[in-house]
Image (cartoon, rainbow, N blue to C red):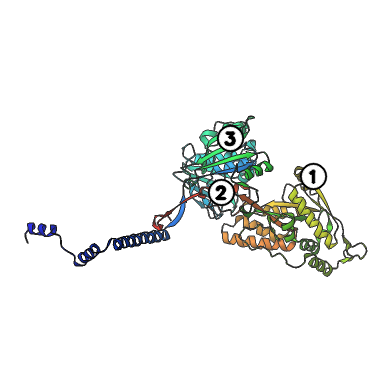
């Protein structure tokens, strides 16, 4: 076939029989029939499109999108927005938002590299080598280098600065290997060391020429330059120069990726009452410590209890007495009544969220159980006086003095314990002290029979300071005067064990051994309450040791989302 014949054939319209027939049939329809067919056609087309749209949406997944802001209220006014000197919750909140460390906390509570790209640990556990991310930047766009890391650690170790971080970094040597590599040399293995490397890093260029005694007065204290997820955009002060708000914007070069939220506005208030009023008026959207029906709730990493002091009252050398007094406490009633349900009952020394199985709380009547234990061990209750006596050991269990801090929550808990011990027949007197006086006049000299107090357990779950027998005297924190060789051995091994599974098993054994010795009547772990709009997604509160921990993974929070095909989502 010649080319010209082929073109002629292609230009010629070829009839399609069934289409020609359909066309002829439609032309023969009346106007009304044509209208019906048109409507049906439009309906079929619309239904098809709707079906395709629904199918598409069923195959798409929702992912966080950038945008939105959050206005939060905080009690107090920040003064030292610096990881080495932060003292108040307001200081720590801003430090958590604007600074970053070599390591950080993931949404699931585990430790992950942030400014560090990787790290390694020597076989003997005494040398840690960190490699920094090549793209790690401070908010002034200067790179984070090994010099910045070593500078920060050396300042933390400077006694003239009086940093709260001094104890964590004492006797540790920090060395610059190269611009992106830092070596830490420990005097002995210490498994919780990685937790210490969450310390925020300072830019050496900005701080190097500031004398230590002028650190607190530097403008950088209130207008920080860090490598955290947010950076300072604006600071608003009141008439007296007091900071009343911080406007923070997302740091686009944050090591873990730009936060989804564009902006966080922190407003500061003089009191919890003022904070509550601001929340109710809608001036702020979120705040911790406010109890609402939608507030996020997670146990603090804290253990409260009534700690027995055998040195002050010999009756507490008897295990059955300590056990009876512990069992007599109705923890469920204590939590629901004295604490308004804002706590988790405890029967052991380790707070919830530690990854171990908690000792079970007996469900039977505690006073009946306590009575049986005392009677089974030779104790008799005098029919006239009601005082418990042990004739064999010439001991009396009569009046007990319970000392605690003069704060509403602890006063209520003390009253609840008093009621339960009175039911057992043990007269109880409560003495209240202002927090400062309690520390200096009661705790340090160990001047108490029973002390209602709380222990803050760090993210590292290191119980050494609280339960090792060598920590019984001030300034040690073993306020129960507890001594157990098996516990001492486990506490020592837990400090050097780098295998997390073995460390968790050791913590489980420690919890069981201490709980079985009843050095204290453990009562509860208070709840951390965080009132935040339900529209803010991505918040996971796993382990809270301090309020600022709520911001550990703030870069993953979001208020906006979008639908995308699954293959477009990065793994």
Image spot of residue 496 (x, y percent): 60, 55
Q: Can you tell which quarter of the image residue 83 is in?
A: top right
> Which secondary structure, mark 3?
loop
Q: Residue 482 falls in which quadrant of the image?
A: bottom right
Of mark 2 and mark 3, the one earlier in the sequence is: 3
Q: Mark 2 points at which residue?
A: 552
Vertical position of residue 567 compared to residue 256: above or below: below
Q: Answer yes or no: is residue 129 visible.
A: yes
Q: How many labels were placed on the picture?
A: 3
Q: Distance between the residues labelled 1 and 2?
A: 36 Å
**Residue 382 shown left or right of residue 3 in the figure:** right
Residue furthest bottom as drawn:
376
Q: Residue 222 carries which label?
A: 3
Q: How far apart are marks 3 and 1 (CA)?
A: 36 Å
Residue 476, position as x, y percentages in the image: 72, 49
Split into 4 quadrants, where in the image is the C terminus?
bottom left
Real-space Cα separation, disc 2 to disc 3, in angstroms: 21 Å
264 vs 12: above or below:
above
Task: Tell which circle, 3 or 1, labels the residue nearer the N-terminal end.
Answer: 3
Image depth: mark 3 or mark 1 in front: 3
At 30% from the left edge and 62% from the top edge, which residue is drawn?
32
Which one is nearer the viewer's eye here, 68 or 310?
68
Toward the right, the furthest residue is 384
Between 242 and 222, the one lying in front of the other is 242
Q: Which residue is drawn at 23% across and 62% down?
A: 27
Q: Residue 163: percent from the left, percent from the top?
A: 63, 40
- Which residue does the numbered mark 1 point to in the structure image? 441
Up-down relation of residue 200 to residue 568 (above or below):
above
Q: Earlier in the sequence, mark 1 or mark 2?
A: 1
257 left or right of 454 in image: left
Give percent across and percent down for residue 357.
64, 63
Circle 1 sits in a helix, a strand or a loop, which is it? Answer: helix
């Amino acid at each position: 076939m010649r080319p010209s014949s082929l073109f002629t054939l292609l230009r010629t319209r070829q009839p399609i029989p069934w289409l020609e027939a359909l066309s002829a049939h439609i032309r023969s329809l009346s106007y009304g029939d044509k209208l019906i067919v048109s409507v049906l056609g439009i309906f079929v087309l619309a239904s098809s499109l709707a079906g395709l749209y629904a199918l598409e949406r069923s195959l798409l997944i929702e992912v966080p999108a950038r945008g939105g802001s959050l206005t939060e209220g905080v009690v107090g006014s920040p003064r030292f927005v610096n990881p080495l000197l932060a003292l108040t919750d307001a200081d720590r909140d801003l430090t958590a938002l604007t600074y970053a460390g070599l390591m950080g906390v993931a949404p699931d509570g585990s430790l992950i590299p942030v400014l560090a790209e990787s790290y390694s640990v020597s076989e003997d556990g005494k040398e840690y080598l960190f490699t920094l991310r090549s793209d790690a930047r401070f908010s002034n766009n200067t790179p984070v280098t090994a010099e910045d890391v070593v500078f920060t650690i050396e300042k933390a170790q400077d006694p003239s600065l009086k940093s709260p971080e001094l104890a964590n970094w004492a006797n540790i040597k920090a060395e610059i290997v190269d611009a992106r590599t830092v070596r830490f040399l420990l005097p002995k293995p210490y498994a919780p060391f990685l937790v210490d490397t969450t310390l925020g890093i300072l830019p050496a260029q900005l701080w190097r020429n500031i004398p230590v005694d002028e650190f607190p007065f530097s403008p950088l204290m209130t207008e920080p330059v860090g490598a955290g997820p947010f950076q300072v955009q604006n600071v608003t002060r009141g008439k007296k120069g007091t900071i009343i708000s911080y406007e923070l914007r997302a740091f686009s070069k944050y090591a873990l990726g730009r936060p989804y939220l564009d902006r966080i506005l922190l407003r500061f208030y003089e009191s919890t009452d003022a904070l509550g009023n601001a929340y109710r008026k809608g001036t702020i959207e979120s705040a911790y410590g406010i109890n609402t029906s939608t507030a996020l709730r997670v146990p603090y990493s804290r253990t409260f209890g009534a700690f027995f002091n055998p040195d002050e009252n010999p009756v507490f050398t008897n295990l059955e007495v300590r056990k009876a007094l512990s069992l007599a406490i109705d923890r469920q009633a204590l939590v629901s009544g004295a604490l308004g349900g804002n706590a988790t009952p405890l029967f052991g020394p380790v707070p919830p969220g530690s990854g171990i199985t908690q000792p079970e709380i007996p469900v039977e009547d505690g006073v009946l159980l306590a009575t049986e234990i005392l009677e089974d061990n030779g104790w008799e209750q005098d029919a006239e006086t009601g005082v418990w006596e042990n004739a064999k050991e010439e001991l009396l269990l009569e009046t007990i003095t319970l000392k605690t801090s003069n704060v509403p929550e602890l006063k209520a808990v003390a009253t609840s314990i008093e009621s339960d011990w009175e039911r057992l027949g043990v007269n109880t007197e409560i003495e209240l002290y202002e927090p400062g006086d309690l520390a200096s006049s009661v705790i340090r000299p160990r001047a108490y029979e029973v002390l209602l107090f709380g222990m803050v357990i760090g993210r590292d779950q290191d119980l050494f300071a609280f339960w090792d027998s060598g920590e019984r005297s001030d300034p040690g924190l073993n306020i129960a005067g507890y001594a157990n060789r098996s516990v001492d051995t486990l506490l020592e091994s837990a400090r050097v064990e780098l295998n997390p599974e073995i460390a968790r098993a050791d913590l489980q054994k420690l919890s069981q051994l201490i709980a079985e010795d009843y050095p204290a009547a453990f009562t509860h772990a208070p709840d951390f309450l965080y009132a935040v709009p339900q529209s803010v997604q991505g918040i996971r509160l796993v382990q809270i040791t301090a309020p600022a921990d709520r911001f550990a993974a703030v870069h993953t929070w979001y208020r906006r989302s979008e639908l995308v095909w699954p293959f477009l989502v990065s793994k």
